[in-house]
Image (spheres, grey):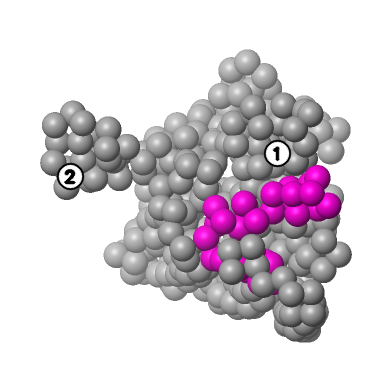
Amino acid sequence: MTETFQSWGMSYEWAWGLATISGILLIALPLMLAVAMIIYVDRKVWAAINLRRGPNVVGPFGLLQSFADGLKVFLQETIIPSAANKGIFILAPIVTFTVALAAWAVVPFSSTAVLADINVGLLYILAISSLSVYGIVMAGWASNSKYPFFSAMRAAAQMISYEVAIGFILICVVLFAGTYNLNDIVRAQEGFGFGLINAYVIHPLLFPMWVMFFISSLAETQRVPFDLTEAESELVAGYQTEYSSMSFALFWLGEYANILLMCVLNAILFFGGWLPPLNIDLIPWFDIPGIVWLLLKTFFFFFMFSWVMATVPRYRYDQLMRLGWKVFLPISLGFVVVISGYLMATGHYGAAA
């Protein structure tokens, strides 16, 4: 894109700046639209599983319901508690929303459609995702209310607990791929299964890692059954209790942007990302754009997120912590050792090594 703007007579600096801004908008604006529609899909899945109709009034098939909810929230009054720390109270949802968008900079939508194709993309994702807890902690503390504060402490403990396990799981993927670059990780999965299947998940050592990664994704995004930060039976609404209007909406958008990010990472790290499922030339798989395959896989994982939310009851907090520290951590650490030994024994040092 920079070269295109340069061909219009721009200097390199202006062309690069305009290309960067255009790339950000090309990701952020469709992502916001996707978040609005994915909330609609989420509600429809819950309704179908519970034998209800879901949104069906605003617009054809209820497709405009999310936009109507957004307009309603926008027109509400923003209320700031008198005892709250006003600066941090206002800043918290902005931090949550901004961090949720920043992580998408390194997501490869196809072999060429990526804003920043950096060699440490996976480390960037880990670093950015670890920052998302700051918005919640700031909201809980700044509200000067006991329920948001308890929620913030829960969120910090929960996200730290499962990020440790996720880190070891990602090490297993990196050992197979030999790179931290997300595009190269996708390419390493081409024909990985007997030359026919483009996915890491079919390997007997990586399938348990995907199961743990999927469950940890639910915990990282505070999704049912791990929504202990928003447990209405205990904490009213958790860190969002004192928020209203657009401040509440920014938390909502940031939460769903993080959910979509985790769905995309499931697809990229274990299911071939933008590659077609099968590596067979007889079927015109490769005529379909890579972004279409990635979106289909992402939608599949989001359906699984919604399915779990509609069917699985909430964990107790002690069960959540026990699962993270006493089950996932030792198992993921053990698999790092086993996979390292397996790769050394078979002489496989990663596709990019």
The reply to whether residue 223 is in sight is: no
Q: Amino acid at mark 2?
A: Tyr
Residue identified by numbered label 2: 12
> In what element is the residue under mark 2?
helix
Q: Which residue sits at x=71%, y=64%?
A: 213
Does the magenta portion include 188?
A: yes
Q: Which residue sits at x=13%, y=41%?
A: 11
Q: Which residue sits at x=83%, y=52%?
A: 194
Instruction: Give coordinates of residue 139: x percent, y percent.
Output: 45, 65
Instruction: Give coordinates of residue 173: x percent, y percent.
Output: 67, 66
Tell me the tag on residue 276. Answer: 1
- Boundaries of the magenta span: 172-199
In the image, residue 65 sits, relative to residue 130, either above or below, namely: above
> In what element is the residue under mark 1?
loop
Q: CA distance from mark 2 to mark 1?
A: 36 Å
* Contact between labelled residues 1 and 2, with CB atoms less than 8 Å apart: no
Q: Nearer the viewer, residue 109 or 224?
A: 109
Give the quadrant of residue 163.
bottom right
Instruction: Give coordinates of residue 166: x percent, y percent.
Output: 65, 71
Asked whether, in this view, residue 291 is left or right of residue 43, the answer is left
Q: Amino acid at mark 1?
A: Pro
Label 2 Cα crowd, 10 Å radius (few <14 / some 14-19 / many 20+): some
Which quarter of the figure is the N terminus placed in? top left
Q: Nearer the viewer, residue 229 or 203?
A: 203
